[in-house]
């Protein structure tokens, strides 16, 4: 279903390039294709992620920073290291 747009909710594992960097408290708009995790020959990655409440992966999506530094300040400081 190419070019189909659908709003979803839930936890997604998002794979991104190292740069640009994103930080705790940034509000992002992530646009991409959701994929079901694959099970490998010697490891059931899909089940592993499901146990963590993750049912989809998005590889290298388009990411737009909407706002920066919106997190709880003490945690921003801790996560900055």
Image (spheres, rainbow, N blue to C red):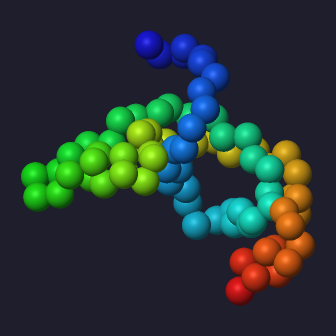
Q: Nearer the viewer, residue 21 or 37?
A: 37
Q: Quadrant of the N terminus?
A: top left
Dividing the picture into quadrants, the one containing residue 78 is bottom right
At which x and y percent is residue 22?
71, 63
In this view, 61 is above or below 21: above
Residue 24, given in percent of the width and then of the height, sits at 75, 65
Residue at 60% over, 27% down: 8
Residue 29 position in % (x across, y down): 73, 40
Look at the image and tell me whether residue 59 can be seen: no
Indicate the position of residue 39 as horizontal and vertical percent values.
Answer: 21, 46
On-image quarter of the C terminus:
bottom right
Residue 43 relative to residue 7: left or right:
left
Residue closest to the far bottom = 81
Rendered residue at 54%/44% (across/down): 11
Name the residue: 88% across, 59% down.
Answer: 70
Asked if residue 58 can be seen in this view, the reply is yes
Q: Is residue 7 left or right of residue 64?
A: left
23, above or below 3, in the image: below
Quadrant in the rendering for residue 77: bottom right
Quick one: which residue is furthest to the left in this view? Answer: 41
């Amino acid at each position: 279903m190419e070019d189909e747009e659908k709003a979803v909710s839930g936890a997604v594992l998002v794979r991104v390039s190292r740069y640009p960097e994103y930080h705790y408290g940034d509000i992002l708009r992530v646009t991409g294709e959701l994929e079901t995790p694959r099970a490998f020959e010697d490891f059931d990655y899909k089940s592993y992620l499901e146990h963590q409440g993750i049912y989809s992966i998005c590889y290298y999506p388009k990411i737009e920073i909407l706002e920066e530094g919106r997190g709880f300040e003490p945690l921003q400081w801790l996560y900055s290291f």
